[in-house]
Amino acid sequence: MKKRPSLLFCYGSIAVGLFLGSLMAPLLRFTLAHDWGLRVENILFYRMLFASLFLWTFCLFSKNTRPHIKRIFADRRTLVFLSVIGLSRAAELLLWSVALRDTNVFVVNILGNSTPVFILLGTYLVYRQKTSSRALIGIAVCMGGLCLTGLSGGAGGASLESVLQMTGTAVLQTVFLLLSQPLRSGDEPLPATLMMAFVFSIAAVCSLGLCAVRSVPIAPFPWQGWGMLVAMTLLCTIYHQTVPTWTLQFLKPENVSMLNLAGPVVAAVTAFFLLGEVPNLQTVCGGIIVLTGLGWYIRQDAKAKRAQMSCPPQDQQ
């Protein structure tokens, strides 16, 4: 029997993953600011390519994932789901990168953390899952903060176009999560590493096609460019997305989600030192309102779930 890791180790792992994930936006801006021949299209291609190669290597050598590979190719429905998920993932990351070129890192991370709002709407429309009225207050507060951030403009602010682009990113992230749920549930759930290997592979093919259509070169690059690509893949893509999933075996989802709310703050501090970006006062106020609304929503939603689990089922008459 494997020894259960300590809470300190779990929280420490999440903190490291949170820090590395928050580095993605400033590192991308830093890379685009240099004349290394890298653009959002070929950066996306190599991130997806390197991540898929790493995960496929892990899956092929893992006894737990190898049996599921044949199952995927034998099930047409699963292949269709994975293809749509891969397309949505590629579109989401591309839209996120384009929005990052026109606005600052703080705004990008604030709007990126608004995904729970659209997940709530999506789960209600698709699965008819309701939430408490108190949690809806957090959603309203969050939307108000998003509007304030979107109207900030100017130096250190965000244009309406950038806000719409990041809103589209949040919607695509919702599509990704909703379509992934059927594959990760049931009697034989698909391993997360194998699913992401397929998703990253499809996203890599899509981004390669985008590079061809837009005549974006995929080589050669100086050693600095290759170094940044490897760093963004290993640190900001694979580690950042794998560790929170692993810790869900030992921590409650609401605890992990609460820690993720610190992402915009970490990204803003990193962007200040790497890029010299300073968000304006209206943007900061809007970001604080968004984080407050998200924190309230997650707390109230967790309370409702705990109350539902503790309530004994009523006997049917």
Image (spheres, grey):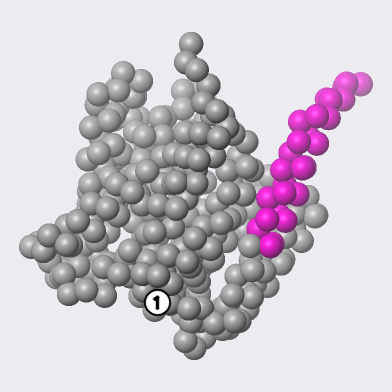
Magenta stretch: residue 199 in it?
A: no
The boundaries of the magenta stretch are 292-317
- In this view, the residue farthest toward the right is 317
x and y, in percent, of residue 95 in the image: 38, 66
Residue 75 in sight here: yes
Q: Residue at x 36, y 69 (%)?
A: 274
Residue pointed to by mark 1: 276
Q: Residue at x 37, y 66 (%)?
A: 26
Q: Eyeballing the image, is 47 above or below 281?
A: above
Magenta stretch: residue 308 in it?
A: yes
Helix, strand or loop status at disc 1: loop
Q: Residue at x 26, y 42 (%)?
A: 52
Q: Amino acid at mark 1?
A: Gly
- Position of residue 105 in the picture relative to residue 198 (left or right): right
Q: Eyeballing the image, is 249 above or below 18?
A: above
Question: Which quarter of the rendered picture does the C terminus lie within?
Answer: top right
- Position of residue 82 in the picture relative to residue 13 (left or right): left
x and y, in percent, of residue 187 in the image: 51, 22
